[in-house]
Amino acid sequence: MIDGTQIREHMEVVGSDGKHVGKVDNVRGTEIELTRAMAVGKHHFIPLSLVARVDDKVRLSVTEDGAKAAWREEMH
């Protein structure tokens, strides 16, 4: 699993297909919290275990659709 300290606020998160999944709000434990879409009003959390690597972006080991199927939603 990737060390969460490599992941910074506002980094783009992309699926293995190169499609945009979201932007990092912060890392909470073993999950990445994505910035909340104002229209949706929900926070989305992606497990760090789905991160393949981190460079200028957070690159997942699953596609955009796979990330959306695996994320956890939380109302705030």
Image: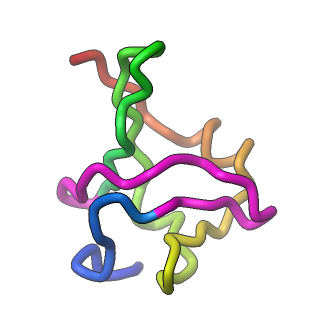
Count of numbered marks: 0
Q: Is residue 39 left or right of residue 74?
A: right
Quadrant into which the C terminus falls: top left
Colour pattern of the rendering? rainbow
- Please check the rendered image and state whether residue 44 is part of the magenta-colored stretch, yes or no: no
Q: Is residue 49 left or right of residue 27?
A: right
The location of residue 18, given as percent across then percent down, is 76, 64
The location of residue 53, given as percent across then percent down, is 53, 82
Q: Quadrant of residue 68?
A: top right
Question: Which SS does the magenta portion mostly show?
Answer: strand
Q: Is 43 above or below relative to 58?
A: above
Q: Is residue 51 left or right of residue 69?
A: left
The location of residue 10, given as percent across then percent down, is 35, 58
Quadrant into which the N terminus falls: bottom left
Q: What span is in magenta?
A: 12-30
The location of residue 65, given as percent across then percent down, is 74, 42
Q: Is residue 18 left or right of residue 12?
A: right
Nearer-the-camera pick, 66 or 9: 9
Q: Residue at x 34, y 30 (%)?
A: 43
Q: Residue at x 58, y 71 (%)?
A: 59
Q: Is 38 above or below relative to 69?
A: above
Q: Residue at x 32, y 73 (%)?
A: 7
Residue lying at the far right of the rendered structure: 17
Nearer-the-camera pick, 51 or 57: 57
Q: Residue at x 52, y 47 (%)?
A: 22
Q: Is 40 above or below relative to 53?
A: above
Q: Quadrant of residue 9?
A: bottom left
